[in-house]
Amino acid sequence: MNPMYGFDRILRQLEKVKALINLEDNIYSQLLEAQKVLEVSIPVKMDNGFIKIFKGFRAQYNNARGPYKGGIRFHAEVTYDEVKTLSAWMTFKTAVVDIPLGGGKGGVIVDPKTLSARELEALSRGYIRAIHKFIGPNIDVPAPDVNTDPKIMGWMLDEYEKVAGHHAPGVITGKPLSIGGSEIRSFSTAQGGAYVLDEAAKKIGLKRGATVAIQGFGNAGSHMALILEKMGYKITTVSDSKGLVVNCSGLNINELAVYKVKTGSVKDFPSGEKIEGSKCLEQDADILIPAALENSINKDNAPAIKAKLIVELANGPVTPEADEILKAKGILVVPDILANAGGVAVSYIEQVQNAYNFYWTKDKVLRKLEGIMCRSFAEIWDIKEKYKTDMRTAAYILSVERVAQAMRDRGWG
Ligand code: NAD
């Protein structure tokens, strides 16, 4: 993993916030490590009859505010440091939107594309058997992440319930609808991002109709494009790993989504203009949404960014060096721990519905999500103004203070 995306980044952020809020040493020192990181071996009988051992992790950074919460990723480059870092990010994300949860993250070192469907199911069930004592609706609640989806969550829930011997739908979120999932989970990250984008745009005098560039047209980016288009924003640039499409009059996102499903990329979309190179970030657009990779905005490309507003739908897309450059240019950055918190906010709503065994309408869940996102945006904006700082620092001031207060109230100080 790139060191800029590692646990060092959490430590740097904590150091900065400690000085601003006078965080006491006894609390601060406990935030410098995860509470627990579990490493497990998962034996899977492969289709050729041989047993292969996979390595998996579950990191639990802090549970002062509630059960640990965070996704499980299946990726060849998963590391101990990565899951630990992401579990800390989850802790601050759940705190920033004030839902009563802590932060966790899991991962298995595997390229799932190399597995058959049967092997993938066996690995998913094996991972849950390996970590089942450490998770539970009131302990630690996993969810989908990179390369995991509702189908895998369904297998994992089933395995957990078999081991536990009873139903426990609240142990995992992002499940299929038929077994307690949420109707809006597939687009909740984008929907939450759209609510805060709209609030941020108002603050800097941008109106619906403003132009938008989106880097990444996967789950988060494509839903964001569809939602913003419906809200009246003009999506002029979209990129994915294979290419870039630009249309200054606005792309038709429904047609682009259909084209992407058919061809596997946005590249060469017929109604796009021909643009050489792949510089999505530097296109002329009022609003830029990184929705692909970590560190995609760095010291090399930040000086060329023309947008007035950046909304971080991806996790960690702006490096600390780039952050300074964007600040000096007067670009407003809505940080990832707020901008992409819609996913975990709806996961929380899914957990609440599972606990009640009662399900709200889609409209009601959307209204609850809007309330959570807009309230959190306003709270962070007030702190930004009070401390005369940027939104990222304000978001960390709010979230670290909330985690610290829960720790103090438990007598951990
Ligand atoms: P995804 O795999 O569905 O989509 C990623 C997209 O990025 C793909 O379209 C891919 O082609 C594109 N991409 C990869 N490299 C690129 C490059 N160099 N230039 C342009 N595009 C490139 O993933 P996702 O679920 O949409 O997640 C995207 C980001 O959002 C990640 O950082 C993820 O952690 C974050 N996020 C997602 C969710 C969610 O609910 N999906 C929640 C929170 C955070």
Image: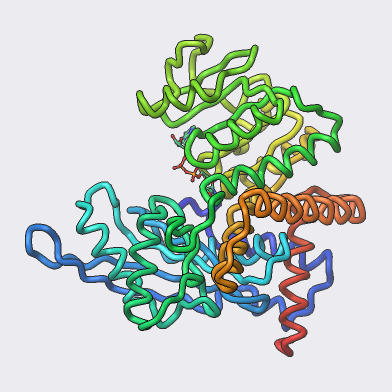
Residue 286 placement (x, y as % from top left): 73, 25
Q: Residue at x 58, y 67 (%)?
A: 358
* Screen quadrant of the C terminus: bottom right
Residue 300 showing in the rendered view: no
Quadrant for residue 365, please give it: bottom right
Nearest the camera: 124 or 5? 124
Q: Position of residue 87 (x, y in %)?
A: 54, 65
x, y percent for residue 107:
40, 62
Identify the residue at horizontal 75%, vertical 80% (top origin): 25
Frontmost residue, 129 versus 349: 349
Residue sitting at the far right: 386
Residue pictured at 74% horizontal, 24% vertical: 210
325 over 11 or under it: above or below = above
Residue in the foreground of this view, choosing between 34 and 52: 52
In the picture as drawn, the residue positioned furthest to the left comes out as 49
264 with respect to 372 (left or right):
left
* Picture layout, residue 412 above or below residue 127: below
Residue 315 in sight: yes
Is residue 399 shown left or right of residue 269?
right
Identify the residue at horizontal 76%, vertical 70% (top origin): 402
Q: Quadrant of residue 42?
A: bottom left
Residue 34 occupies quadrant: bottom right
Q: Position of residue 343 (x, y in %)?
A: 58, 53
Q: Is residue 262 left or right of residue 135?
A: left
